[in-house]
Amino acid sequence: MFTYEVIKKVKFDAAHFIPEYKGKCRNIHGHTWFVEAGVKGNKLENGMLFDFTILKKELKSICDEFDHKFLNELEEFKELAPTAENIGRVIYEKIEDKLDKGLELSFIKVFENPDSWVTVTKD
């Protein structure tokens, strides 16, 4: 049996700061965030596991909620520091609920820049 994984990447721009952090990130600053989502499974329908267009639409819809926003002011981050780890977790939870039976969200990656990212998976 084969396992397939469909991956899509989208981006958004947003500002944040990390409360109680001892470095520069305690100050308000912005990023062009890139987010990748991987959906895996082993059942193909019409030769496809999951349509790239649908994955892009769902992921973009979630990321659009953060686009050009100050993340610290959003409801999701009122009691949760808007770190890359927590942004990934929030996105993971939102997109996981939208997947059909037989599909599994394998990961969410959140890139703050091209050489710094977090991968969120679920045990």
Image (cartoon, rainbow, N blue to C red):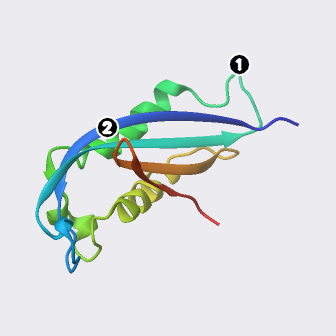
**Amino acid at the residue labelled 1:** Asn
Between discs 1 and 2, the one toward the N terminus: 2
User: Which of the 4 image quarters holds residue 4?
Assistant: top right
Mark 1 in CB contact with mark 2 (< 8 angstroms): no
Mark-to-mark CA distance, 1 and 2: 29 Å
Q: Nearer the viewer, residue 32 or 113?
A: 113
User: Residue 71: horizontal and vertical position, in percent?
Assistant: 19, 59
Density class for disc 2 (Cα within 10 Å; few <14, some 14-19, many ≥20) is some
Q: Residue at x 17, y 66 (%)?
A: 24
**Amino acid at the residue labelled 2:** Lys
User: Residue 36: horizontal and vertical position, in percent?
Assistant: 46, 41
Q: Can residue 59 be seen in this snapshot? A: yes
- Disc number lying in front (1 or 2): 2
Examine the rendered structure and indicate whether residue 105 appears above or below residue 25: above
- Left-right relation of 16 to 89: left
Q: Residue at x 56, y 51 (%)?
A: 107
Q: Can residue 70 be seen in this snapshot? A: no
User: Residue 37: horizontal and vertical position, in percent?
Assistant: 50, 43
Q: Which mark is residue 46?
A: 1
Secondary element at tag 1: loop
Image quarter where the N terminus lies is: top right
Q: Nearer the viewer, residue 80 or 27?
A: 27
Residue linked to disc 2: 11
Image quarter where the C terminus lies is: bottom right
Outermost bottom residue: 20
Secondary element at tag 2: strand
- Left-right relation of 78 to 38: left
Q: Nearer the viewer, residue 73 or 13?
A: 13
